[in-house]
Amino acid sequence: MTEVGQAPETLLEVKHLRTSFPTADGTVHAVDNVSFDVHRGEALALVGESGCGKSVTAMSIMRLVATPGRITGGEIRFKGKNLADIPEREMRNVRGNDIAMVFQEPMTSLNPVFKIGAQVAEAIRIHRKVSKKEAWKQAGEMLELVSIPDPVKRLDDYPHQLSGGMRQRVMIAMALSCDPELLIADEPTTALDVTIQAQIMELLASLQQRLGLAILLITHDLGVVAEFCERVIVMYTGRVVEEATVDDLFANPAHPYTRGLLASLPSVTKAEGAKRLPTIKGMVPSISNLPQGCKFNPRCPDVMEICLGNEPALMTVGAGHAARCYLHGDQPDPERM
Amino acid sequence: MTALLTVNELTKYFPVKRGVLARVVAQVKAVDGITFDVARGETLGLVGESGSGKTTVGRCILRLIEPTSGTITFNGTSVRELDSGDMRRMRRDMQIVFQDPYASLNPRMTVGSIVAEPLIIHGVSNGTEREQRVAQLLEKVGLQPEYRKRYPHEFSGGQRQRIGVARALATNPKFLVLDEPVSALDVSVQAQVVNLLQDLQDELGLTYLFIAHDLSVVEHISTRVAVMYLGKVMELAPRAALYANPLHPYTKALLSAVPIPDPKVKKSRIILKGDIPTPLNPPTGCVFHTRCPIAQFPICKDVVPPLIEHQPGQLAACHFAGEAVPGEGKRSEGVDSRALSRTTTRD
């Protein structure tokens, strides 16, 4: 959180980002007018259900959107430089050195036919002018950083010899090998068991502290968000629908979608006897066929006349808290225009 | 309550074969001597991490895979002694809903024929009667009867899971194995399917074996919960007792690892070291001793702890059941399960 009088340093600034995919039904915008900042050293969560555009947002920042998808609007400013229009060669230097990424599937993100050491060393040698031997040594140090037992021995292992949790540690080691300032973690624990998830999240939290790393955590798990992040962006149908500190979001969710999501979680903290789970009616609309006005209006319990007309902007709810909803007036938040 | 299903000392070993002669060189002990029963009308939650053998248990009960040993008694009949014809007739009463709603429906069949297939196989109904039954089943799971002419790809994950449930209900079963029925679904859809399953249970008097790795869903839906680890039951207890006062250190660690969607709750967490060992070569004695924070040697390494009753209805397989685990939060008296391993001392 920001102390009064000391603005946090903005590391990454995403402004009006739009990423589009041509389809048989015309062009669809998987990410539409998405804006947010990532501050130096913070853990920011990007949450939403499948298809909400959270992963496409991450891929857009890395400029790794699979063709025919492409960024069709907006800016991605990393320390002032607009990544959306630098040449690919320059972008390659940004990846790894400045921004690195960890993917969901540790099983498929590693090459099965190369040793762990070779893969980590390759990442190091692409970005640093070091000898093979030196890179191998550094790879061992990286594995030690992510608390892999017997790191030097593990360098000679192939991916199939490691468990899912260990593979995810290798992925993190690889991502951090060139000292990035921002780590994008796309569902890093979704494929892992809960006791292993706890280990990995603990590791990420300690690395964030020790290295002063900013982390953009993409997840659908609100439990992980509550325990790990300081701020959170909620996405729905390619849009940001709410932005808040984690404490505000859970104490005082402002968008009916966020409220519905939080209510529908079965959890140990729910009152005994509340047998039926509250649900959000209907389902997420297809992004090629979105409703008029607010995109949540067909499912919203608080829908009003105005919601069917123009799509709401992000309205101010409180300090650092905004929601794309007419329940909070019709004056757009000036900071999020 | 009487037991509808009794499982006694069930084991399933998968042989590992090598070489030209396909000699058996090892056994994967997927399920290693587990015993439990499911009472009529209750939901028994079966939780465990991947590789714990929970899915294998579900499939062994329906004999979709043949158990290695043990007895399974369903409604007074010994399931393992039935020949294949009798077994097929028995499956009219016991059905299964699979985890992956994308893989468990034939993409080339219409929804109507998917739901009608069990009716045809079991010769339950014919002609217009069958069509009416299909329409009625689709309505029961919250789908429009007109959908029967459509194909699975036209439906979302939640809707497909409803189709899977309709198919399982076609023969009017008494008992359903629900194998991770909501794991592949988004939270808002997950809540809809969980509610549907509970409504159907109330309406039709169904008995469920609910297999899952998500502890909060299991807590919501179960009457009793069994916790599995490496093919064995570690703890078996009524829902409230298991979540409020777990006795086995593995249950404690598992519960403390679940992230709680409430930033005000600060948990003290028991982080288990290492990974689940391979069931190809499980540890001796207590299978959990390699990761257990309170293991004592040599007893935990040498002696398999029996699953015995420590509290009324609460069974645990641990030499030191109920003993405090380092990292476990203080629990104040008389507070609900929320207080488990957590303290609310933030700010």
Image (cartoon, coloured by chain):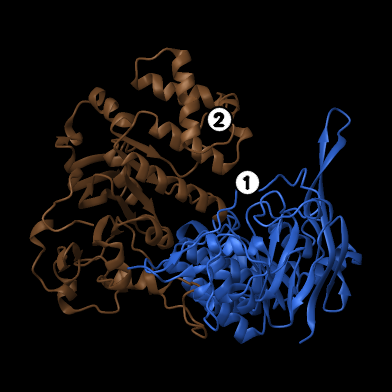
Chain colours: A brown, B blue
Chain bearing tag 2 is: A
Q: Position of residue B329 (x, y in %)?
A: 53, 67
Within 10 Å of disc 1 (Cα), the crowding (few <14, some 14-19, many 20+) is some
Near mark 2 (Cα within 10 A), the count class, few <14, some 14-19 or many ≥20, is some
Quadrant in the picture for the N terminus of chain A: bottom left
Q: In this rendering, do the residues under marks 2 and 1 share a single chain?
A: no
What residue is rendered at 61% in x and 45% in y? B274
Q: Total label count?
A: 2
Q: Residue at x 17, y 37 (%)?
A: A79
Residue at label 1? Answer: B275
Type of amino acid under label 1: Asp
Compute the Cα span from label 2 to label 1: 16 Å
- State the residue at coordinates (34%, 43%): A184
In front here: B61 or A174?
Answer: A174
Tell me the SS state at disc 2: helix
Residue at 70% in and 48% down = B290
Q: Chain of mark 1?
A: B
Q: Please identify the quadrant where the C terminus of chain A is shown.
A: bottom left
Query: Residue A312 lies in what quarter of the image?
Result: bottom left
Q: Is residue A2 left or right of residue A287?
A: left
Residue B36 can be seen in this image: no
Please provide percent x and percent y for residue B32. 81, 56
- From the viewer's perspective, tell me whether residue A19 is left or right of residue B154: left
In this rendering, would B309 be left or right of A287? right
To which residue does mark 2 refer?
Answer: A151
**Drawn side of residue B176 relative to residue A154, left or right:** right
